[in-house]
Image (spheres, helix red, strand yellow):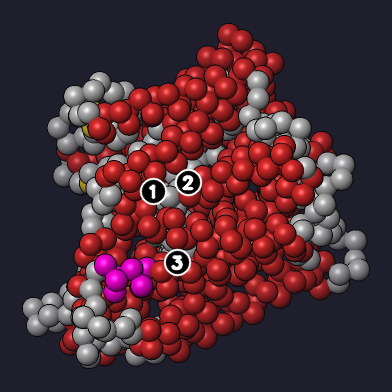
Amino acid sequence: MPESGAAITQAAHPNPESFAAAGDRGVTLRSIAFGLCLAVAVSLLANTVLYLVHGSLMAYSHMPMGNLILTMLSMVVCSVLAFRFGRPFVFSRTEWLTVFTMGFVSSLGPTYGVSGYLVGVIVSPYYFATPENRWSEFLHPYLPEFIFPQNRNGEMSWFYNGLPHDAAVPWEIWMGPLFWWFTFIAAVAFACFCASIIIHRQWSEYEKLVYPAMEPIVEIASLGGSGKRLLPEFMQGRMFWAGFTVSAFIYCWNMIGWFFPAFPSFRMTPGWYLPLARDFPALWISFNTFVICFAYFASLEVLFSLWFFDLFFVVESGILTRLGMPSWHAYRSAGPYTWQTAGAFVCLAVFWVLISRRHLKDAFMKALKPNSDHIDDSRELISYRAAFLGLGIACCYAVAWLWNVGMDSGVIALTIPTMFLVYLAMGKILADSGLVFLSSPTSARTLVQASFGGPKGIPAATHALFYPTAVALSHFKGTIFTFGMHANRLGDFVTGNKRRLFWSACAAFMVGLVASTLYVVWLGYTVGGYNFEPNWLVTRAGHSGFQGAVSDIISPKPMQSSEYVFFVVGVIAMGVITFMRYRFTWWPFHPIGFALSGSALSHLTGFTIFLAWSLKAILLRFFGAAFYRRSRPFFIGLLIGYVFAIALGLVLDAVWFMPQGHRIHVY
């Protein structure tokens, strides 16, 4: 069944050639300008909702809700205006893809993207320093002043407690550090974007990955509104409106209970834990509509493996815990099981690089000799020569920046390639699975520390800087590599000059990063950072991260031999699973499931993935592939209805419940 499901999904996924649109104007200047405005709007919306309204998460997932709300609202408004005033308000498919891509990439800036962590990193080390935690002794000597503003006159204290009367925001102490952080993050992001372009052909054409999360986006953009109807063309048909009604009705019904607490409601999110047995992690039972909407477009094989290996994590980690090796904590793996998953993840990443070696060689030869026939790069967002050149220059700057701030050269030399390996694996998992909530099971920082024998083998200065630089080098969302990978896929459906889309996406990322960060700094001084609660990004993440760094300096713990053993076990097990999958067609397990087993978001969405797999399997079994293809508008309607409900919830929260909003959209 998994194989047949994969084949059906493959056959149903959109072909760029079939989406060629007559009269498509390509990437126009108005779509770029619109996209830049959207990038700023996404940043303001996401930060405002999280820090002031305390509502739904607008920029947490790999399909940011803030961008979806603003893009869909723009499409509806333009469709209404086009119906009334005609062609000037009609946007082509490529224009809508450009607008969506720019908002999509800019969503890495606000909140859980970069700005939340970055501001928390900058503001914490001097404000939270006390004689008891000894930061001034073991941390401050290694923090360069040009990237960490001081708290000599209470500037960092003002950020958390609000400005004194008649005082102005002390931008002068922020501008220098923020500039250097922006250049470092931009260099890492640009390198990752270039790397995603280099690998794109291997995934999209040679391995035929379906990019499930992008399928509904392409269909929506292709039917964005011609001016012949009041609403966009994708908002038509009984299937669409059935899906829209189901999700919109359920969530809008629940909103009545916000005003009348005794009113009955549907139990959606958050879910609840289902304990199984002593020492075993509980199952998280929830129905996440957002996950269902995109998981439906993935293959049965991937969906089955994701929930199966989540159960595998529950069983094995419980057994290990009973044997005296604690292997889970709250909703994720810990201890030995974490290293087993890390070994599996690294093994799979290395395997994916190896099977791409011929393409990588051809791309490199094309970069050296652009007129050669090794490979055609005319359909990529930029040429392979530009991609390799950009990758090299950006990496050189990142290395020079890290060395200049005081990180150990050996650690730097290992961290950069390890970062690319981790981000590449995350990107391919997203391209093959359609997951919208994904956290990496390991990071470059963790793997590099392990390769040096644990924190004990890392110099003190590097410990002090390892945590703050993780904002780019060990980000749980993969910085811009995962976003760039999806942007490349959308670029397959873009008509005309694709180079414009690349540079527009780069500009949108920087606009989102800068606007979001400056807005958070301004908010801190205006309303007081402590009023961002309940939220740990700015108020607690920096404190806990630096305290961990100081602990590693004072009392570093070496790696345990058992951790290396479990890492090797994960490598061997993943090798067997991968061999079986590529050797035998009847093998039901996809390696992705094991590579994510026990990771936080994988466990929290495991039950929803099971529901998505069950629903799709039943429909294919009893109604066939033709019905599956006809049912796709239902799930697009389900998605749009959900987006509408979240947008309505934000309005209600802002008007009646601020600052105690309701988190409908969560993982």
Numbered mark located on residue 516 in the image: 3
Q: Position of residue 211 (x, y in %)?
A: 63, 41
Q: Please tell me which residue lies in front, 34 or 209.
A: 34
Q: Residues within 10 Å of mark 1 (few under 14, many from 20)?
A: many
Determine which residue is flagged by label 2: 65
The answer to if 522 sits in the magenta stretch is: yes
Q: Residues within 10 Å of mark 2 (few under 14, many from 20)?
A: many
Marks 2/3: CA distance?
16 Å
Query: Can residue 388 be seen by looking at this rendering?
Result: yes
Of mark 3 and mark 1, the one earlier in the sequence is 1
The type of residue carrying mark 3 is: Ser
Furthest-left residue in this view: 132
The answer to if 539 sits in the magenta stretch is: no
Quarter residue 11 falls in: top right
Q: How many marks?
A: 3
In the rendered structure, which segment of residues is drawn in magenta?
Answer: 520-527
Q: Position of residue 217 (x, y in %)?
A: 63, 40
**Picture residue at 90% right of the left edge, 61% below the top:** 373
Of mark 2 and mark 3, the one earlier in the sequence is 2
Asked if the residue under mark 1 is in contact with the one under mark 2, i.e. CB atoms within 8 Å, the reply is yes
Of mark 2 and mark 1, the one earlier in the sequence is 1
**Picture residue at 57% right of the left edge, 57% below the top:** 38
**Picture residue at 39% right of the left edge, 59% below the top:** 47
Compared to 614, does 548 lie above or below? below
Q: Quadrant of the N terminus?
A: top right
Quick one: SS at disc 3?
helix
The type of residue carrying mark 1 is: Leu
Determine which residue is flagged by label 1: 57
**Picture residue at 53% right of the left edge, 14% below the top:** 618
Quick one: SS at disc 1?
loop
